[in-house]
Image (spheres, grey):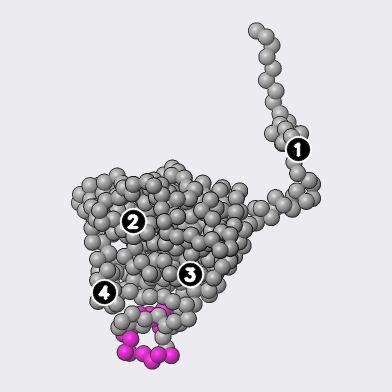
Amino acid sequence: MTTVDLPLPGLHGVPTVPEGQTLTRKDFTSDQEVRWCPGCGDYAILATFQAVMPELGIRRENIAVVSGIGCSSRFPYYVDAYGMHSIHGRAPAIATGLATAREDLSVWVVTGDGDALSIGGNHLIHALRRNVNLKILMFNNRIYGLTKGQYSPTSPVGIVTKSSPQGSLDAPFNPVALALGSQATFVARTMASDRDHLAGILRAAAAHRGAAFVEIYQNCPIFNDGAFDVLRDAEQAQARLLRMEEGQPLVTADRAVISGTRGLELVPRDSVQDEQVLIHDPRDPDPSRAFTLAWMDPGDMSHVPVGVFRDISRPAYDDQVRAQIDAAIEAGGRPTDDDLNNLFAGRDPWVVEDDGS
């Protein structure tokens, strides 16, 4: 089993298991029956998550999984840790409060493309902007699965569904570009069908201190079957996937990324020298290169970047809130009941008296 070096920066303040104690995937498997459709990509994500968690060495009682509404949002039931199946689109907001109040928790948000990018769009971008210490896993099947197949914010233009019988006219979101535009400090993309790659991305997200956003391509066999089939075929994947690894050249089987006169360009690999090929640097403080890489996929999956787009360090929102509270307590002492009563009453309160009538 692949392990990680402990302690991870992203888990600062989170208690780990006692020395000599070992957790396994079984420890993170609940007694609940898993209820997804046969062939759903969520099964692979759940199994990979349950396999990676023991490697982190975190006590189960110090892990919290918060979800919204959707097929993916059943996730907390199946992980034997603390969890909350919350309300539509609001998982990042609820998780923000939890992470801020409890430094001793590793907080994970599980959401879908509809839950996160439609009704939950504002909550997602502000959690990323604030850099709250959350690990946000967004399952992207490019459809609304739970409500039976309406087009979602990531569905391609022209898709025929129950809510778009003539074909969808909506231009889809690019979730990675959206996360980068929200100033996220960690942004990655992976696939449920590639368990090893998925596990590596989950480890990297756990190691990050701050908001980590992970888009996971995941097949819906009932309402959008085969959406990512070209990336699951070994030969097709080799030609289409731009695997981004830190310190490694950005290449596919026959293409290479170079810095051209008009910015980054994807050119035939045999048309350039090795030294011209761009080396991937997710820790570049300038997000423009990562943003350009996010748009290397023209929408037809002819060239799809996968891996970590960005991984930089910036103070986490919840760490700063706790520091403010500690500074206020040190300067003025802990608040008393009188302090709270005065705060609630304010300087100019209204008093409603009962005259007995």
User: Looking at the figure, which quarter contains the N terminus?
Assistant: bottom left
The image shows residue 150, relative to residue 199, as above or below, that is: above
Q: Amino acid at mark 3?
A: Thr
Left or right, 139 with reference to 82: left
**Is residue 334 found left or right of 89 in the rendered image?**
right
Q: Are marks 3 and 2 in contact (CB under 8 Å)?
A: no
Cα distance in 3D space between marks 4 and 1: 64 Å
- Looking at the image, tell me whether mark 2 or mark 4 is earlier in sequence order: 2
**Which numbered disc, 2 or 1, marks the residue that appears first in the sequence?**
2
Number of numbered callouts drawn: 4
* Classed neighbour count for the residue bearing mark 3: other residues with Cα under 10 Å, few (<14), some (14–19), many (≥20): few
Q: Is residue 259 magenta?
A: yes
CA–CA distance between discs 2 and 1? 48 Å
Q: Which residue is mark 1?
A: 336
Element marked by disc 3: loop
Instruction: Tell me which residue sits at (34%, 56%) in the image.
Output: 42
User: Compared to 99, does 205 lie above or below?
Assistant: below
The residues tagged by marks 2 and 4 sit, at their Cα atoms, a distance apart of 21 Å
| Tag 3 residue | 3
Label 4, secondary structure: give it: helix
The residue located at (44%, 63%) in the rendering is: 52
Q: In the displayed image of the protein, which residue is found farthest to the front?
A: 20
Residue matched to label 4: 234
- Tell me which amino acid carries mark 4: Ala
Q: Quadrant of residue 5?
A: bottom right
* Residue 251 percent location from the top left of the image: 36, 81
- Dot 1 crowding, Cα within 10 Å, few <14, some 14–19, many 20+: few
Task: Name the one closer to the observer, 233 or 76.
Answer: 76
- Please report the bounds of the magenta region as a residue range: 257-275
State yes or no: discs 1 and 3 in contact (Cβ < 8 Å): no
Q: Position of residue 36 (x, y in %)?
A: 30, 50
The amino acid marked with disc number 1 is Thr
